[in-house]
Amino acid sequence: MSKGFGLGAGWLKVGGASTSVYCMGAVAGITVYYLAADWWISWRRQAAVVKRSAIEIEAEKEERGEEYESSGDRYGSLRICGRFVNPFDSWRDKTLWDFVRWLATRTAGNGLPSDKSQLEKDLPLARPHLRLLRRLAGEESDAEPDADAEYADYPAIDAIDGDSTMTATWIGQSTCFVQMEGLSILTDPIFKRRTVFSWLGPERLRPVPCQLADLPRPDVVLVSHNHFDHLDVDVVRALGNAVTWYVPLGLRAWFARLGVYRVRELDWWQETEYTARSGRVFRIAATPTQHWSGRTGLDSNASLWCSFLVRGKRASVFHCGDTGYCTAFERIGRLYGSVSLAILPIGSYAPRWYMQHQHIDPDDAVRIHRDLRARRSIGVHWGTFMMSDEHYLAPPRDLAAAAARSGLAGDEFVAPQLGRTILYAV
């Protein structure tokens, strides 16, 4: 930044010039400096992508989940000048002009009704099956039995075997509470009313279906990237070192500044083990996505972004986070085989010319569902915070149409109700 300041000062500082002119020169210099740096990184990224594409991809490794070297593998993470970049042909860097063009052409309202009762009807809330979730987590529940009235069609709690049953509860955006084989997982946690502060950022369309304290304490938390709508600082402070956090490269220091040190930082294709309180061992792998990171204008892409695959003895779950479509999902499917449940984003995709590189649409989500060989998938990242141009009810409608075109079974890939706990046999 000091280089940019000096450059601007040198351009416009003249004898007797006003302070305002001097400052304008400094701002211009800083702007030129950062634009030039962005151009340089973009050029280096494209050169690296071309070089990687020219290298013949090595034969699929025999040992499932073997770590891949970033320097030689087409699907390894890539960092240039201290910033992570997407090493995929399908990515395109956005320019300032792209952003201005999008703002200037945005459609207003997303079809949101002025009548709140209509919104409540269109996006009904369910109460999570808290007694079941606490029982599967080995915790006592103070919820009254009649609180489970909306789950009257479910098996009796005592009849549900946690070893052969998974639960998934969508809290909103990409936040899910998943249980499998005695392990409780929280993904991309945010429970705020707004994304940034209580007074700043897009507001939830509907209230959060439960509070963090209502849920059993998670064993692990998976954070795909550090955008505000995927990482709530209040949740980090509340859970602290009582859980194990799994995050992409470059994000551990942010947690350390909050006094949280029980953090495992993973590169793409890197794996680790988690031993649950029961003694069971789970494999956790970080896998590629096509996105970006940043919480301020000064930390863009300073940390990586990723998806996660958690495998137990019988069950597995894939948490995607945010992504545009890329062929890395085919590689994930080939390496790891079928997954029991995939949590895939289906919203924030319009207009496609601007969003397609960073957010998939329902057609892309169905494609990833097939790439991963997922037995079941749920569509998230919709109906919570409106940060794009599609109608607020378009994601589930478009998902149903995309699933039908692809010949998926009716319950194979669904957009769940906010807060409702879903059971899956494994």
Image: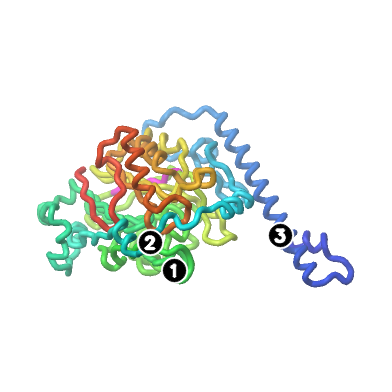
Q: Is residue 286 magenta?
A: yes
Give residue 179's mark: none
Q: Earlier in the sequence, mark 1 or mark 2?
A: 2
Instruction: Look at the image and give the residue range highlighted in magenta.
Output: 282-288
Left or right: where 415 falls relative to 54 = left
- The reply to whether callout 3 and callout 1 are in contact (CB within 8 Å) is no
Q: Is residue 69 magenta?
A: no
Q: Circle 2 sits on which residue?
A: 205
Image quadrant in which you'd find residue 110: bottom left
| Mark in the foreground, 3 or 1 | 3
Crowding around mark 2 (Cα neighbors within 10 Å: few <14, some 14 to 19, many 20+) is many
Question: Is label 3 in a helix, a strand or a loop?
Answer: helix
Q: Earlier in the sequence, mark 2 or mark 3?
A: 3
Q: Amino acid at mark 3?
A: Ile
Q: Circle 3 sits on which residue?
A: 30
Q: How many marks?
A: 3
